[in-house]
Image (cartoon, rainbow, N blue to C red):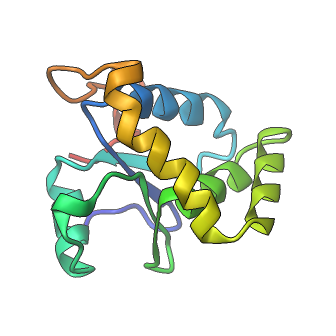
Amino acid sequence: MNIPKYKYLILFDGVCNLCNSSVQFILKYDKKNQFVFTSLQGKTAEKIIDNFNIETSKIDSILLFTPEENLFYKSTAALKIAYRLKFPISLLSIFFILPRFIRDIVYDFIAKNRYKWFGKRESCYVPTPELSAKFLD
């Protein structure tokens, strides 16, 4: 896979308005240039999903692929991303004190309703030329 070394790869739903807004938010606050992105509909995501034997019908989540080749999903991925962003956003990682199953119940409720609440795009997000280096395929 062509993931830049020492970068965290965020896999997101490219047609979800909430997910795209989240990507824009991360881009704004990623002052250390730690993250690159790909949509779940892309070829890089497909390779990672195949490598980790993830059932695609059950993916309703943001995924975080780390430089150590670990894959995190749902609330754990979101909190690990928040932790790596600048203060005060990094304070959201305090929610790691909650058990994962509780965090994931909240996450799943939002994920289940995201299209209804925030809408859906016809096609995946297309970055500006200035940001295109941060997006794979």
Q: What residue is rendered at 26% in x and 25% in y?
A: 126
**Quadrant of the image occupied by residue 88:** top right
| Picture mark count | 0
User: Camera-side residue: 99 or 130?
Assistant: 99
Residue 32, image x, y percentages: 68, 46
**Quadrant of the image occupied by residue 2:** bottom left
Q: Is residue 55 above or below residue 57?
A: below
Residue 81, image x, y percentages: 61, 53
Q: Is residue 131 visible?
A: no
Q: Is residue 83 above or below residue 99?
A: above
* Residue 113 shown left or right of residue 103 in the figure: left
Residue 6, image x, y percentages: 53, 67
* Residue 60 shown left or right of residue 29 in the figure: left
Q: Is residue 118 above or below residue 3?
A: above
Q: What residue is rendered at 47% in x and 34% in y?
A: 23
User: Camera-side residue: 126 or 100?
Assistant: 100
Q: Is residue 33 above or below residue 76?
A: above
Quarter of the image that includes the N terminus: bottom left
Q: What residue is rendered at 84% in x and 41% in y?
A: 87
Q: Is residue 12 visible?
A: yes
Q: What residue is rendered at 48% in x and 39% in y?
A: 110
Residue 40, image x, y percentages: 24, 50
* Residue 113 shown left or right of residue 72 in the figure: left
